[in-house]
């Protein structure tokens, strides 16, 4: 499925870029209270930055570019992880993480960005271009983020997420979480490839 309307595609991407940028601003500058360097260490912020950069790339890159499905898949996987971790692992523990309720910044970065970027791919990208050979590129950033967070946390004692906290989980527990999350990353990647092929085969492009 692909809506071949460049103006509609551009308009959608620009609106989504505005929403993602607003979410990043509210998160990093804490609603105007000042710059928070600590927020940059969260996967949510980094994956949203990747979405903003990817949207700029998609706005100006050629659709036939071989790099395009690698960029799209890599960023799509990362931002979907952001949304899934938030809604499945963090949101159920609202009393711990969101005692004051879920604010606009969290809605934009954890819900609007993942769903918006997913819909952008479904609606406007040419299908049938994602391949299993792309999976190492797609999973590189989440795994590198985990490794860096563990190494920095071991020195500083700060871990962005509870499933990385070696102080509480130990290295064994953290590695178990890594194995589980890695399997989830690969599963999401395979599902995206499967959906890409399904849409390419069964749903005709709109004119």
Image (cartoon, helix red, strand yellow):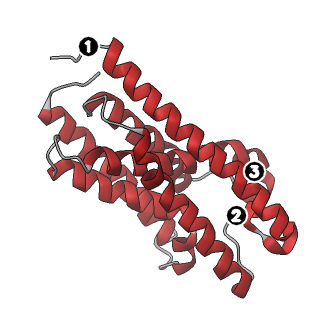
Q: Position of residue 185 (x, y in %)?
A: 58, 46
Cα–Cα gap, marks 3 and 2: 14 Å
Residue 97, relative to residue 125: is it above or below?
A: below
Instruction: Select label 3 or label 1 by which is in front.
Output: 1
Q: Which mark is residue 67?
A: none
Q: Position of residue 129 (x, y in %)?
A: 30, 35
Q: Which mark is residue 94?
A: 3
Which mark sits nearer the N-terminus, 3 or 1?
A: 3
Instruction: Select label 3 or label 2 by which is in front.
Output: 2
Residue 141, relative to residue 103: is it above or below?
A: below
Instruction: Say which residue appears at 73% left-offset and 66% top-offset.
Output: 164
Instruction: Say which residue appears at 38% left-offset and 33% top-offset.
Output: 119
72 relative position to 95: left or right: left
Cα–Cα gap, marks 3 and 1: 42 Å
The image quarter in which residue 137 lies: bottom left
- Closest to the observer: 127 or 21? 127
Instruction: Say which residue appears at 49% left-offset and 59% top-offset.
Output: 140
- Per the image, label 2 sits on a secondary structure element best described as loop
Cα–Cα gap, marks 2 and 1: 42 Å
- Closest to the observer: 94 or 101? 94
Q: Position of residue 97 (x, y in %)?
A: 73, 58
Is residue 108 visible to the viewer in this orientation of the structure? no
Which mark sits nearer the N-terminus, 2 or 1?
A: 2
Report the residue marked by disc 2.
161
The image quarter in which residue 158 lies: bottom right
Q: Quadrant of the C terminus?
A: top left
Badge 1 density bin: few <14, some 14–19, many ≥20, Cα 10 Å: few
Which mark sits nearer the N-terminus, 3 or 2?
A: 3
- Per the image, label 1 sits on a secondary structure element best described as loop
108 relative position to 5: left or right: right
Report the residue marked by disc 1.
204
């Amino acid at each position: 499925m692909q809506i071949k309307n460049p103006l509609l595609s551009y308009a959608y991407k620009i609106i989504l870029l505005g929403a993602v940028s607003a979410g990043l601003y509210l998160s990093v500058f804490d609603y105007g209270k000042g710059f928070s360097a600590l927020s940059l260490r969260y996967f949510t912020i980094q994956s949203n930055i990747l979405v903003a950069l990817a949207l700029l790339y998609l706005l100006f890159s050629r659709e036939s570019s071989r790099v395009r499905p690698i960029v799209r898949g890599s960023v799509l996987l990362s931002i979907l992880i952001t949304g899934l971790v938030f809604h499945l692992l963090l949101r159920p523990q609202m009393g711990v993480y969101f005692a004051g309720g879920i604010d606009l910044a969290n809605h934009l970065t954890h819900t609007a960005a993942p769903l918006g970027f997913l819909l952008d791919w479904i609606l406007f990208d040419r299908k049938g271009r994602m391949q299993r050979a792309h999976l190492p590129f797609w999973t590189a950033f989440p795994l590198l983020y985990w490794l860096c967070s563990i190494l920095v946390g071991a020195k500083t004692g700060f871990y962005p997420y509870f499933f990385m906290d070696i102080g509480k989980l130990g290295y064994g527990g953290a590695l178990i979480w890594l194995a589980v999350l890695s399997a989830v990353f690969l599963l999401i990647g395979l599902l995206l490839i499967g959906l890409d092929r399904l849409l390419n085969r069964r749903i005709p492009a709109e004119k």
